[in-house]
Image (tube, grey):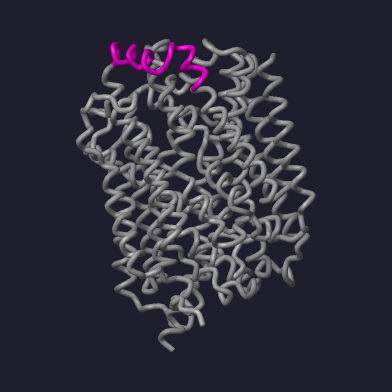
Amino acid sequence: MTTLLVLAVYLAGVLSIGLFAHRLFRGTGEDYAVATRSIGPFVLLMSLFGTHMTAFSLLGASGEAHRVGVGVFSLMASSSAIVVPLVFYFIGTRLWAAGKRHGYLTQAQYFRDRFQSDRLGLALFVVIVALVVPYLLIGVLGGGLTLTQITNGLVPSWVGGLVISIVVVTYVAYGGLRGTAWVNTFQTLVFMILGAFTLIFLLRQLGGLESALARVGAARPDLLVRGDAVPIAKLLSYTLVPLSAGMFPHLFTHWLSAKRLDTFKLPIVAYPLCMLVVWVPSVLLGVLGHIDFPDLTGPASSSVLVRMIALHAPEVLAGLLGAGVFAAVMSSLDSQVLALSNMFSHDIVRHYRSSWGFAGAMTDRQQVLAGRLFVIAIVVLTYLLSLVATTTIFGMAVWSFTGFAGLFPIVVAAVWWRRTTTAGVWAALGTVVLLWLVFFVDGWNVPGYSVAGTGILPIVPVVAGSALALVVVSLLTRPPERAHLSRFFPETAARRS
Amino acid sequence: MSTARREPDRGPHTAPKSAPSRLLFALLAVFFLLRYDLWAQSDDSFLLGLPIAFTYHILYCLAAAVVLFLLVRHAWPSHLDAPESQAHLDTEDAAR
């Protein structure tokens, strides 16, 4: 009962922040979608980090560490710690500048304009939506299952999913991006602080770090070295996973919300430190979970953190951990829902309304209304799907990352390479879809699937194939017109004139 | 009269090309390769109270923050924020 009370207080706090943010709402479509590009450094850092981290960082990471040991940190955390900030630096800042210059609100708007192709914008829209949907499902399902676990089955998972859905839809629809960013900041602080607190508390319960590691080392020394569990091919493959951040629509939305270019500085520098605060407790506690729960295997290992807290901690801490997991889930779910809602409102309704027989441009009021209706529709649909989806959907996360990383060469070429052609981007997109489908059909139900058993993950050929197709076809086709490029590379045009 | 050298206007999509910037990008490439600690694949020793494979990557994350700080300090693409690049919000563009 105490657990539920703590969770209820937490969710009430989240709703209050989201509703308070509405007081600053300016009533325009741009304010709803990107907070009139007014977000400062700290809120941007917390929004980007909280959006990028999901429940996997708390539960999945500890479960993986329980299975394979400390090598998980080198596999997933340290690669993101350097690659993701570099994506902000090399890609995010450029997209922010283009967005501010031309008033973009979504990725499809940018790519449609950059490559002068309506169909390409539409195709990217379809692919991006298809890749985000599993993510939404994972959030709703993960939140529901966590609530069931920490209440020892008292609350069924559909109730947890429903609660998360109602809270998210309320503050996203009401507060738009500003509400989402503020709530993200609060939630990110919550799961960072609770992660560190949980580590300190459980280490004391286990007799201190040295003693606890010695006990694990005596029983499972393999967990304290990287060893065969993380071979070099896997380590190299995982380097590509964080590239997916470059094409996430929810990160794109947050990039556009930055007030100034300098706003990016803090997120870039502090990102690796935030990774440490969240991932060190997760990985360490996952490994130390072997002391009390040595027999957990497979998907059950993801519950090791929850089980440790249930065993060692009072109900209040269980409630706080539940709040931390909810925070991680909702801080991703809200931004994904808002990004999809923006895409449907602007890339479909606003862009195609004239071809449907509607005259004139959409008013701000209509844009906001469309955004809110899409938020509600997306969350309702996701929740209904979560009722029929199975937990095998969790395996979809890695496939989603693979698809987004495959699209990364497209955004790199768009902001850095003038010679990129529309045909080149089509070739890259087609290659990603084709290779992704081939590998997915072959390995979606194979745990630890790698290309022909080599240890190399599908993400490697998908990214390489995408980049190769883009470069070769671009070079073989007619270069874009200079007049058009001058809108995206104005400095080069100025030098040449 | 100011003796400060005026930075050339490179425009929104050109990375800074000063010598310190080039040095930083080279440092970045080397730093990136340091992530692959092949020597620690089977090393079971401890450093700072933790398994070395774990400690190394914690220190790597801390070093990453330092490298990134140097990057934003000395190779920041401030030309992206130039007045001409934010002169107006072209809402017609967005509606296209």
Q: Main secondary structure of the magenta part?
A: helix
Quadrant location of the C terminus of chain A?
A: bottom left
Which residue, as the protein is rendered here, is positioned at the far front? B1
The image position of residue A103, as x and y in percent, is: 62, 68
Is A372 covered by the magenta stretch?
no
Quadrant location of the N terminus of chain A?
A: top right
- Which residue is drawn at the image coordinates 66% and 41% (left, top)? A183
Is A216 covered by the magenta stretch?
yes
Q: Is residue A208 above or below residue A86?
A: above
- Which residue is drawn at the image coordinates 64% and 47% (left, top)? A181
Q: Quadrant of residue A161?
A: top right
Q: Quadrant of residue A14?
A: top right
Which residue, as the protein is rendered here, is positioned at the far bottom? A497
- Which residue is drawn at the image coordinates 41% and 44% (left, top)? A81
**Image side of residue A128 versus residue A180, left or right:** left
Q: Quadrant of residue A146?
A: top right
The image position of residue A336, as x and y in percent, is: 58, 46
The image position of residue A53, as x and y in percent, is: 51, 39
Residue span colored magenta: A200-220
